[in-house]
Amino acid sequence: MSLPAPSVAAAAPERHLELESVRGLAALLVVIYHMPHWYPPFFTGVIANGYLMVELFFVLSGFVIASAYSQRIHSVRDLLKFQFLRLARLYPVHLLFLLVFLGFEAAKYMASVRWGMQMPNFQPFKENSWEAFGYHLVLLHGVLPKALQATFNGPSWSISVEFYTYFLFALVTLLSGRLRIFGYAIFALGALWALTQEVAPLYSYTLRCLSGFFLGVLVSELIAAFPNIRLPKGAAFFAVLFILIFLGFKPHGWGDWLIFFMSAFLIVALTKTSDDWFKKLFRSSALLWLGTVSYSVYMSHYSIAWIANQVVRVLLKRPDVYFEGRFAPSLGPWETMAAYVIVIGVVLILSSVVYKRIELPVRQWSRQYANKW
């Protein structure tokens, strides 16, 4: 008699704690990247290339999801459970901050109509239109070939493309069986080729996710196939160092695809080396906490940065300067550093609340509910 296939709602596999810390640090760099350009000289090097941490997120996500589910999706019911759990993981926090940004649009409209204030960047309900809001509701704003990715809560475009990439992963896993690695490779390499050749520029956001996610899946399959792979001590340190050097000196927009492979190497280095001081650092309680709340950090920071920008513009009455296609009020270097610290602190506090009150309870409920299927 054969044993039943494990449910996708079964107990989670062993976690790689170091990767949680990587996720948290990457989210923090994205926060700094999205800070208003109060002092433009700060926007250079590692900060200017901080957008590539989203690519790192994709590779990490592919690795973690494949490690947990590539052997656990055996039926349509398993696929539906998996996708339900992914929706419960992403959607509540996404909806919360989508509504927050809808409130911001209403406030901008009132300020424009009632008090005649001029909007230096986007006009109320123009770029952030009701059509865009509808696409956000169904998580299609990052997938469609329209200029919707930067609307409302801008960073949520990655949540949009990742949600449908999850479904594609589950479908390939279900239909390909033991040949699934070939399906994963087709999507990883095909998307990477299309991205580097700019074959489908309108779908570049989706291609970024497919490339990174399925490369992470392939890393998981490689480690599972060759469990005795070991890298020398210090590999994780040098993997992080290589990424920092790359971000620090890479010309903006050049060679972005290299971050996929650097991220893959970082994952292998953190999971397949013996313990050393650097890995222990990545298991410190502060970094693990940051990794735990990293999704809430990623989804909340844009709203706090927006509020801070209005405080500087309206209350402090600082003049606007034009940089990188947008207007932002100007501050001095020390004022900017102080503002960054305050904004990051508020983001971390808010993220802790959102994680405890929304993210964690919904995740626990969804797992309990899925176990009844």
Image: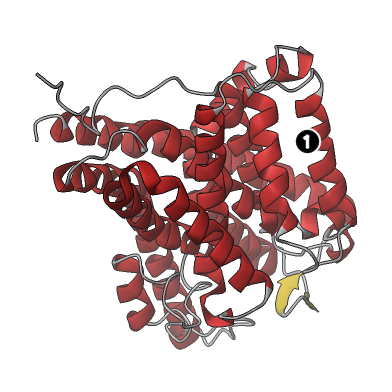
Percent position of residue 205, x then y = 54, 68
Residue 328 in picture, x, y percent from top left: 72, 71
Between 124 and 219, the one lying in front of the other is 219
**Mark 1 residue type:** Val
- Which residue is found at the position 39% from the left and 66% from the top? 103
Q: Is residue 131 above or below residue 281?
A: below
At horizontal 55% and vertical 32% (from top left) the residue drawn is 291
Say whether residue 96 is left or right of residue 190.
Answer: left
Task: Mark yes or no: residue 32 visible.
Answer: no
Counting labels gives 1
Mark 1 crowdedness (10 Å alpha carbons): few <14, some 14-19, many ≥20: some
Quadrant containing the N terminus is top left
Tag 1, which secondary structure?
helix
Residue 362 lies, in percent from the top left, at: 26, 37
Residue 159 appears in view: yes
| Residue at 84% in and 65% down | 40
In the depicted structure, whether residue 1 falls above or below residue 181: above
Nearest the camera: 297 or 228? 228
- Find disc 1 in the rendering and name its residue: 240
